[in-house]
Amino acid sequence: MRRRGGERIRPGSRRKPRAAATRSTAGTAQRTRGTAPRTGAAPPRAKLEAPVAVPLLPLRHPALLLVALLAAAGIVASVSFRILDTDFWQHLLVGKAIWRLHRVPQQHLWTWANYGMPEVLPSWGFRALIWPVYRAFGIPGLFAWRWATTLLAFGLMWATARRMGARGLTPLVILVWCSLVYRHRSQIRPETLAAVLLAIEIWVLELRRPAPHGGNGPDHAPWLVPVAWAWVNSHISYFLFFVVLGAHVAAEAWRARGLPRRLAAVGAVSLAACFLNPFGWRALWQPFDYFLRLRHEPMFQGIGELQPLGWLNNQTNGVFVMLALWPLLLVWRWRRRGIDLVELAMCVFMTGYMASSERFFGAYAVAAAPYLARDLDEWVRARRWPAWTAPAWARAGLAGLAILGGGAAEWARPDRPLAIAVDMNRFPVRAMDFIERHGVRGHGFSQTRVAGYQLWRFWPDRGRLPFMDIHQTGTAADRTLYTLALSRRDGWRALDRGGRFDYAVLDPYLADSLLEGLDADTSMALVFLDDAGALYVRRHGPLAAVADSFGYRWIGGGTEKVARAFAEAAGDSAVRVALGAEVERLTASSPLDARAHSLAATLAISEQRFDAARAALEAALHVDPRTPLAHFRLAGLALAQGRALEAITEFERERALDGPRPGLDLGLGMAYRAAGNNAEARRHLQREIHRWAGSPSARAAEQALSELR
């Protein structure tokens, strides 16, 4: 059965398409047959091109090869942004330890609080593979790993889609689109290896399925046994192997009205092979332990990547369109060729799996790729297209435009610039330098975000191991106290338990409550602070000399202590001088000093040294273009100095960085009023009033608006 103009036509049938389907081309058909127009009729219109079907291209056609190369380049671009994940340091360190110890450790070696305890070492296979790559090739080697694993995974999905019937150019566009979704999980993580294993499994299973849903090829199901073994030794997501296999077993059992013994036997042998790991059944229990117990703990509920699918990080990758398109295409193909039970099971499970947690973006993108490619390619070929799309190079051009246009916004994201580098500004390098240089050691507290890099720097020195590693290793009580310390200002006291920690290393931008708690603890002294790390040491005990020599009196890691210092400095010149000296020392202590420059600007503004404040804010932006409120404050300075147009520009830059915030439209309204544009001033003031009704900025906008009238 084939289609003509969207209607089903049986082979050999001479039935004409329905009139409704051909009404728009009736005049064209009449003129094509040479029928003369009626006497007195309107002059004939320009001849219309008859729509044509989209022909398939052979694999070796230059147009197809060119689009394939462009798609490969797009996939590589999707995973070629700076490495900024904080966990990869521990992955490298554990891989290094495995090779140094010549064994897979059975005991926990990574934190002082749980040192020597029995442990199931997560993802040991991936870590043992990634370390030699890094040792031999450094950072370029890590990027080569990202490129190779991603191209291999999506290359297998392309081969799978082609065997399933997707022979056009549309699948290449789909692969690039899926790589934009996959990008979210493409750091140096064990998921990169798991993605390849998932792709191999889908390829093997789809190859053996009969047409019209599968590849109608040879049965290589026994190959899946080593895939299962490698997966369980590489990542906790190994259970997906049995989900995918189970979907195929169920579909084949439904079709054959009986259990597919060969596939069931492969599943049984694969399960047995999974027990061949250094930790036995305990390794297989890990995903179930998380689902039944750990995911209910406050600490895991607060981890960003374990949160449900959200808009903030996915505005440009098209995942929300994909979530709607896959089920729609599945239903369309269902009505055309019958239900594909495997695709239905994959769509339902993978969509729910990914929507529940952003950690599973990678698996969803890989699993969706072949089915989306097949279904959309079939939908495209079922349509009739204008004649100018028939040439291969015309269609190649359209596919290239779709690839570039679809990926441009995601590839241009300012928070993920394309580069082959590690974003070292995200790691507490100088704080660890201070620890090493001044002999800081003992029982330290480290946020899990900085623990991986601390391990990389100091393992196996037990005096400098973190309290908790990237896997949140510890007791349930410790994890609860850790969460309280990050969420409540009095949580630090409960966590410290009267002097449990000799020092603490925090991320200054992600530990507000904990920073305030440490600032309020008179037994702790801030001795180092930059944009990537805040280091506190205990004033009494082994680190007393460090606290005496380097402790800040007026500056704290949080905002409250600094605000009190500035308030006191406003009425006391001696305090102002002392505070200025500490700001200068803070600026000189690290090149990551955007925060220090911002404090210097605040001090200069309080002394009405506006040019110095402007220079300090520009220096902060040079270090960190996303320095909080820097453009907002520059706009305020420009407005105070009578530069209204410059103020408008800075206010708009602030909006572009962080979106709307209280006072932004108020400032724009005041700037436009100063520039003599009362209409724009009124519009922004009204927006401030409506958007932030009842706030101090809205009340100020009301006052300014009344003055305009």
Image: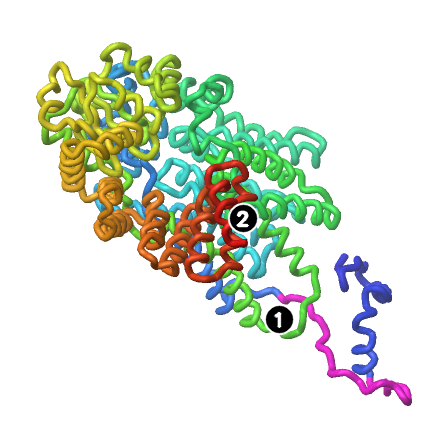
**Residue situated in front as seen by the camera: 670 or 177:** 670
Q: How many angstroms separate mark 1 from mark 2 (CA)?
A: 48 Å
Q: Which residue matches tag 2?
A: 687
Q: Main secondary structure of the magenta part?
A: loop
Q: Which residue matches tag 1?
A: 389
Q: Point out residue 175 in the picture as x, y percentages from the top left corner.
A: 51, 52
Quarter of the image containing the C terminus? bottom right
> Around disc 1, counting alpha carbons within 10 Å, would you say few (fewer than 14), some (14 to 19), or many (20 or more)?
some
Taking the spot 76% from the left edge, 64% from the top edge, the residue there is 5
Q: Point out residue 521 in the picture as x, y percentages from the top left corner.
A: 25, 18
| Extent of the magenta region | 34-55
Whether tag 1 and tag 2 are in contact, CB under 8 A, the answer is: no
Q: Amino acid at mark 1?
A: Thr
Q: Point out residue 612 in the picture as x, y percentages from the top left corner.
A: 21, 50
Question: Is 54 inside the magenta-drawn segment?
Answer: yes
Q: Is residue 116 above or below residue 678?
A: above
> Around disc 2, counting alpha carbons within 10 Å, would you say few (fewer than 14), some (14 to 19), or many (20 or more)?
some
Q: Is residue 570 left or right of residue 173?
A: left
